[in-house]
Amino acid sequence: MSNRENVELRGEQEFIDRLHARVDALRLVAARDVEDALTPVGTGMQARLERDVLVAERSGLLAALNTVDGSLCFGRIDLSDGVAHHIGRIGIREDDAARTPLLIDWRAPVARPFYLATGYTPMGMRRRRHIATEGRTVIELHDEILDLKDRERTGFEDPNGDDVLLAALNSARTGRMGDIVRTIQAEQDNIIRAPHRGVLVVEGGPGTGKTAVALHRAAFLLYEHRELLARRAVLIVGPNPTFLRYIEEVLPALGETGVLLATQAELFPGVHATGTDTPRAGAVKGGEQMAEALALAVRDRQQLPAPGAPLIIPHDDGGDLVLDWEIAYEARQAARDTRLPHNLARPYFVFRVIDALTAQLTERIGADLHGGPNFLGPDDIAQLGSGIAVSKAVHAAVDELWPPLTPEGFLADYLAAPVYVSDQDADTIRRAPGDGEWTPADVPLLDEAAELLGADDSAEQAAAEAARQERIAYAQGVLELSRGSESYEFEDEESEVLAAHDIIDAERMAERHEEADRRSAAERAAADRTWAFGHIIVDEAQELSPMAWRLLMRRSPTRSLTLVGDPAQTSDAAGVGSWEKILQPYVGDRFEHVTLGVNYRTPAEIMELAARVVREKNPSIASPTSVRSTGEAPWKRHAGENLPGAVAQAAADLTPHEGRLAVIAPRALHEEIAAALTGVTAGTTPDLTRPLVLLDPRQAKGLEFDHVLVVEPAQFETSDLYVALTRATQRLGIVHREELPRALR
Ligand SMILES: Nc1ncnc2c1ncn2[C@@H]1O[C@H](COP(=O)(O)OP(=O)(O)OP(=O)(O)O)[C@@H](O)[C@H]1O
């Protein structure tokens, strides 16, 4: 190593040492604050609340400091004016009066040239440096000269400027997605930092970094709009639990935790949608015609007695009541005229019916047979009305006509006897009540039903009010006690001390004593169907059905969304396929559409083969260009008679020293293949960190592995095959018994 190189390395090591000394100090202070705050400081509610807030804040800081520790600083920019900034995963300041920045957060505007500057547009920069560390030791530097007139050389110059990127792309996979904060490319950076408002659609072929970009965008938005998004939270929707587990470490590694990751199946609080639909049933349930069908089915639950066949309600007070078609019709009309959801309109129906029955009874009891005015006065009539209003028999009759409905109960009934869809569709989605679990496709229907029905939360509100009254009573007790003790303590002197009751009444005190909700915004959002998220990011957005879009748009009243997807990889029959069609009902044509065109995952040799597969089906689909090639062509083997044996042999040939191998095979073959593969992990939620994983093509969506073995591709649909072929970062093998699809021959 040259002298100059030594000097450079030493200089960076000194900086990293200084940085870590500062971080250690910060960590110590944060830990001490947490510890201090946890020791009891009196029992006052306010004190406890402040303590909890402090603990949460400092614990968050501690967690961020701990998770980013190993690779806190990864770069440096040297500006033409001689100033240099170090760039890191989070920002750190000196402990001086001016709080001088020591490490710049990658999301800060100052850091932007690190990602965007080129020799043509140097953005005031002279040099870009990548710093690689192992723990707290600097092990490598890579410099790029951006000012072409600059003659200074450090010995670490990287002539192509892509060594760091290529090393990242070639490194062995771990089964967990990592962040790309060291090497975000310019086209990606523009998307990550796009304005927060409105809808942004990010489209790109396999491996173009859509998921990576979406996650870094979440981190950027949380930085840029910290206050709003900490309150309203960010929702990231992914296609399945395995995928969510694959990406779950990226945001914490960037120091961010205020995000809710969920699949469609988890978006109706209280329901675990673990069932499965046939693709056809999923498509029917996801179709937009379901919104209308459910709305009509709800109206059908608002019934009338048949004309001439009234409900006869026994009533002690003066004989039976007759609830006939006319009374019910008028009451129903009045309730429907409110345009409220079913359960919320119901009291109007009830009220009208009670009114009409009261009039009926009044007429019968008090009528003057000689045509004079009714004998009953207002008080008598009111009493009759109250009798009817509390009559169990009246309520039973009303329930029959306009029953209170829950989303779960209503949808179960609907699926048992589907209406307002074609007979064929009805047969496809019909399910006996209690037969099987809720499915992911049921979740948007439950949400739709909840909207149509409305939650009659009067019972909860009554309970909340009762609890409030109880707290007031308690507070009154406390105040009385304090009055008592005051006269006792201060009886001989004129006290200048303000006692609690002088400045606060029982009601206000009760409010203060109310338990504060200390869950994070993301936790509260997860439990609340009507939560409005600050921003929603949807990965594999092409898979979502029109009904799922309705649900998501309800969670985003401000329409602040990032949608990420690749129509060529659409496998779900319910998927919409065109962004215009998805978005038209919600934002018209007011959305940004950007495209990523470089494949960072798949080597050129593999991508070429995969591109042939989609082109054959749809010649207009352009596949992305791979950023690198490995010189290793994908290979194909005929399995002969023993398919599992051939798969096991091929897997053994491909098993990497480090990194991961995925065998992607049709689900129907999994049992026999799994039996032939030692140490394989499989099933509905396989552990991706294991070296050998068996998946079906749908499960493989969004994931990546060092090597991939595709089995019996003739049984895959085109989009699934495209997904399967584009999962490898290094090598791809194909084992088959049936004849290969034409594009692979
Ligand atoms: N700028 C980058 N620097 C380093 N690695 C990158 C960069 N961009 C993307 N990658 C890597 O490329 C791989 C593919 O990225 P990602 O999974 O986000 O792509 P995708 O477009 O979502 O793919 P697919 O649609 O096929 O699932 C990941 O390993 C990711 O870390």
Image (cartoon, grey):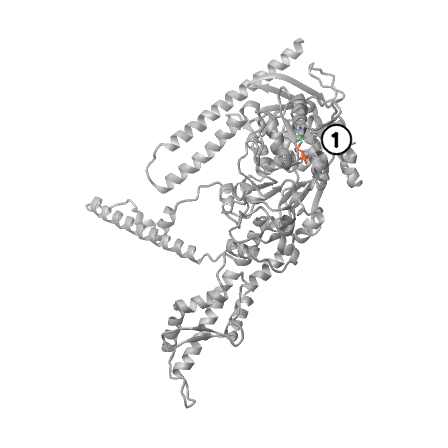
State which quarter of the image contains the C terminus. Answer: top right
* Mark 1: few/some/many CA within 10 Å (<14, 14-19, 20+): many
> Which residue shows up at 71% across the image and 17% down it?
157
| Residue positioned 40% across, 71% down in the render | 388
What residue occupies the far left of the structure in this picture?
492
- Asked if disc 1 is less than 8 Å from ligand 1, the answer is no
Residue 511, percent from left and from top: 38, 49
**Image-based side of 79 in relation to 308, left or right:** right
The x and y percentages for residue 433 are 52, 53
Residue placed at 79% from the left, 38% from the top? 616
Extreme-bottom residue of the structure: 370
The correct choice, above or below, for 432 with respect to 398 in the image is above
Secondary structure of the residue carrying tag 1 is helix
Residue assigned mark 1: 607
Give whichever of 666, 685 is nearer the camera.
666
Name the residue type under label 1.
Answer: Met
Residue 1 x/y as whole percent:
66, 9
Q: Please state which of residues 318 and 345 is positioned toward the viewer in this rendering.
A: 318
